[in-house]
Amino acid sequence: MVNGGKFALQLFKNAVGFVAALICAALFLAWGLFQGAQQGGDPVVLAVMVGTGLVTASVLGGFAMVPAFIAITVAEMFGWRSVVYHVGIGGLIALGMWTFDMNVSDAAVRPGTTIALAAGFLAGGVYWLIAGRTSGRWHSGR
C-alpha cells in the first residue's frame, strides 16, 4: 500500500536533493578551479566562481540525470537509506562521467580522478541529507 501524501513529499525531496547535490558538486569543482585566484578576496572572483558553479551544475545534471534517476528509483523501491549507498553511488556516477570518453586501452588512472570522486561523494552525501534518509518511507509498511 502506498501513502500518497508521503509519496508526493518524497518526490519533492528527491528533486530538491538532486538539484542541491548537483550544485554542491559543481561549486566544489569551481572552488578548486578558482582557488589560486582567491588570494586578494576579490568579490568579482567569488561571483565568477559561483556563476561557473551554477553553469557546471546544469551540465553535470544533463549527464548524471539518467544514472541518478536509476539509483534513486532503486533506493526508493527497496527502501535503502544507507549513507554508504548514496555516497558510493554518487562517487560511481562521478567516476563514470569522468572516465566516459577514456579509451579502454588506457591503463593509467586519468589525472583528476580523485577530484571527480570527491565531488561525487559530496553530491551523494548532500542527496542523502535531503532525501536519502527517508527513501522508501512512503510504503505503508515502513
Image: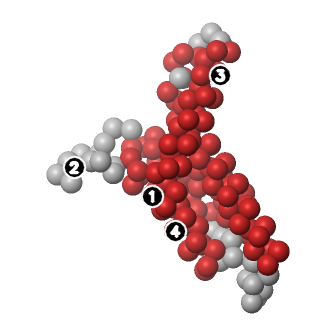
Does the rendering let one see residue 88?
Answer: no
Between 90 and 70, the one lying in front of the other is 70
Q: Quadrant of residue 30?
A: top right
Task: Report whether 96 appears left or right of 40.
Answer: left
Inspect the image, locate mark 2, and give the three-letter code of the amino acid beneath it: Asn
Q: Secondary structure at mark 1?
A: helix
Q: CA distance from mark 2 to mark 1?
A: 18 Å
Between 78 and 111, the one lying in front of the other is 78
Q: CA distance from mark 2 to mark 4?
A: 25 Å
Q: Quadrant of the N terminus?
A: bottom right
Q: Are marks 3 and 1 in contact (CB under 8 Å)?
A: no
Residue at the (46%, 51%) spot, across then down: 63
Q: Are marks 2 and 1 in contact (CB under 8 Å)?
A: no
Inspect the image, locate mark 3, and give the three-letter code of the amino acid beneath it: Ala
Q: Secondary structure at mark 3?
A: helix
Q: Is residue 26 above or below residue 42?
A: below
Q: Answer with mark 1 or mark 4, whichever residue precedes in sequence.
A: 4
User: What number is the disc on residue 70?
Assistant: 4
Does the rendering let one see residue 38?
Answer: yes
Residue 28 position in % (x across, y down): 57, 37
User: What number is the disc on residue 1?
Assistant: none
For the residues carrying marks 3 and 1, which lies nearer the camera in this image? Answer: 3
Q: Is residue 44 above or below residue 105?
A: above
Q: CA distance from mark 2 to mark 3?
A: 36 Å
- The residue that disc 3 covers is 47
Q: Secondary structure at mark 2?
A: loop
- The residue that disc 1 covers is 92
Q: CA distance from mark 4 to mark 3?
A: 34 Å
Q: Answer with mark 2 or mark 1, whichever residue precedes in sequence.
A: 1
Outermost residue, left side: 105
Inspect the image, locate mark 1, and give the three-letter code of the amino acid beneath it: Leu
